[in-house]
Image: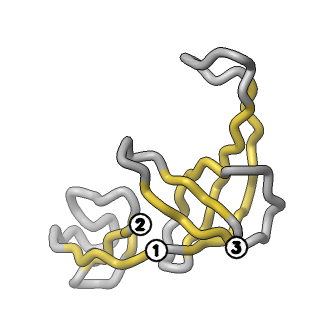
Amino acid sequence: MKVFACVACGQVDFPRRLLCPSCGRDEFAEVAASTGSVEEVTILHHRAGKTGGDIAYIATVLTHAGPRVIARLERLLAPGIVVSLRLESDGAIVGFSD
Ligand SMILES: [Zn+2]
């Protein structure tokens, strides 16, 4: 997946902002954020719109590029574990560990 770095001051954000929250400029460069560290995991039961009582693992992940993102984990992982990140076609971020 990609995050967005302000070309003027280097502030990195995700998702992309209209204006840089740090300096107010509006020009960004895409930066790869393919890995991150799991910070906190929330276990969700009975996802809306799904049947069968699925469990979802939602994590705050600090990407190595800078910003924190919310990612769905493919399985339960402990805080501190480094995950790979990919952006799904529906815009969801998935974290996985091989
Ligand atoms: Zn900036």
The circle drawn on residue 15 is none
Q: Quadrant of ligand 1?
A: bottom left
Indicate the position of residue 65 as horizontal and vertical percent values.
48, 79
Q: Which residue is mark 1?
A: 33
Using a 10 Å C-alpha cutoff, classify the residue at mark 1 as few (fewer than 14 neighbours), some (14 to 19) or many (20 or more).
many
Tag count: 3
- Mark with earlier residue (1, 2): 2
Does mark 2 have its CB less than 8 Å from ligand 1?
A: no
**Measuring 74% from the left and 55% from the top, which residue is drawn there?**
40
Image-quadrant location for residue 14: bottom left
- Mark with earlier residue (3, 2): 2
In this rendering, position of residue 59 left or right of residue 49: right
**Measuring 61% from the left and 72% from the top, which residue is drawn there?**
36
Q: Which residue is mark 2?
A: 1
Please, is residue 70 above or below residue 32 in the view? above
Tag 2: amino acid: Met
Q: Which quadrant does the N terminus fall into?
A: bottom left
**Measuring 54% from the left and 65% from the top, which residue is drawn there?**
85
Using a 10 Å C-alpha cutoff, classify the residue at mark 3 as few (fewer than 14 neighbours), some (14 to 19) or many (20 or more).
many
In this rendering, position of residue 70 left or right of residue 96: left
In this rendering, position of residue 10 left or right of residue 51: left
Q: Are marks 3 and 2 in contact (CB under 8 Å)?
A: no
Q: Are marks 1 and 3 in contact (CB under 8 Å)?
A: no
Instruction: Tell me the distance, in whole angstroms, between the alpha carbons under discs 1 and 3.
Output: 12 Å
Q: Are marks 1 and 2 in contact (CB under 8 Å)?
A: yes
Instruction: Tell me the distance, in whole angstroms, between the alpha carbons under discs 3 and 2.
Output: 15 Å
| Local secondary structure at mark 3 | strand
Tag 3: amino acid: Val
Q: Residue furthest right?
A: 78
Q: Which residue is mark 3?
A: 82
Instruction: Tell me the distance, in whole angstroms, between the alpha carbons under discs 1 and 2.
Output: 6 Å
